[in-house]
Image (tube, rainbow, N blue to C red):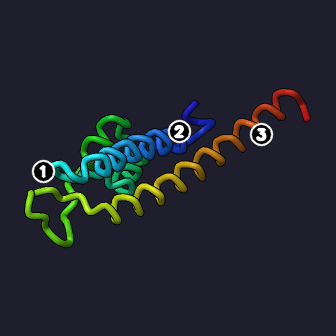
């Protein structure tokens, strides 16, 4: 399947993991001492292209976000930043999904002989 879908299947999985992480950050915006985390998507994809497996790539490229302004309670979530990153990631996820849907449609047509 990797030959058919290339890196896009793994990209979709990484984007899904990142979306969950960003949603967790948003949900914990008022939790004292919560540290916002994120996956460096570009570095994770690059390591996948270098042959690293998906689980290792995601885990190695998780980091804590450094806030622009520190909160008194130790929370590093900046809600506007997290919401923006979540929206951007959602658009990228949908784009990757659309690409994969196009691939599947092409393969289906080839199998039917259209």
Mark 3 or 1, closer to the camera: 1
Q: Residue at left 46%, top 54%?
A: 89
Q: How many tags in the picture?
A: 3
Return the disc, 2 or 1, that comes first in the chain's sequence: 2
Q: How far apart, in angstroms, are the residues tagged by discs 2 and 1?
A: 36 Å
What is the residue that sits farthest to the right in this orientation? 114
Q: With 90 as the anchor, is 109 left or right in this view?
A: right
Q: Are marks 3 and 1 in contact (CB under 8 Å)?
A: no
Residue 20 rendering spot, x and y as whole percentages: 37, 42
The answer to which of 41 and 23 lies nearer the viewer is 23
Residue 3 rendering spot, x and y as whole percentages: 59, 36
In the rendered image, which residue does mark 2 sit on?
A: 9
Q: With 87 as the anchor, is 73 left or right in this view?
A: left
In the rendered image, which residue does mark 1 sit on?
A: 32
What is the residue that sits farthest to the bottom in this orientation? 68
Q: Residue at left 65%, top 48%?
A: 99
Return the disc, 3 or 2, that comes first in the chain's sequence: 2
Numbered disc 3: secondary structure: helix
Mark on residue 106? 3
Q: With 86 as the anchor, is 106 left or right in this view?
A: right
Q: Is residue 19 above or below residue 54?
A: below
């Amino acid at each position: 399947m990797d030959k058919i879908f290339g890196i896009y299947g793994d990209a979709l999985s990484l984007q899904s993991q990142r979306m969950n992480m960003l949603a967790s950050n948003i949900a914990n915006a008022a939790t004292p001492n919560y540290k916002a985390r994120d996956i460096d998507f570009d570095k994770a994809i690059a390591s996948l292209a270098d042959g690293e497996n998906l689980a290792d790539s995601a885990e190695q490229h998780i980091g804590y976000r450094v806030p622009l302004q520190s909160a008194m309670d130790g929370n590093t979530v900046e809600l506007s930043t997290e919401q923006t990153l979540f929206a951007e990631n959602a658009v990228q996820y949908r784009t990757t999904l659309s690409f994969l849907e196009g691939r599947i449609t092409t393969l289906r047509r080839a199998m039917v002989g259209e």
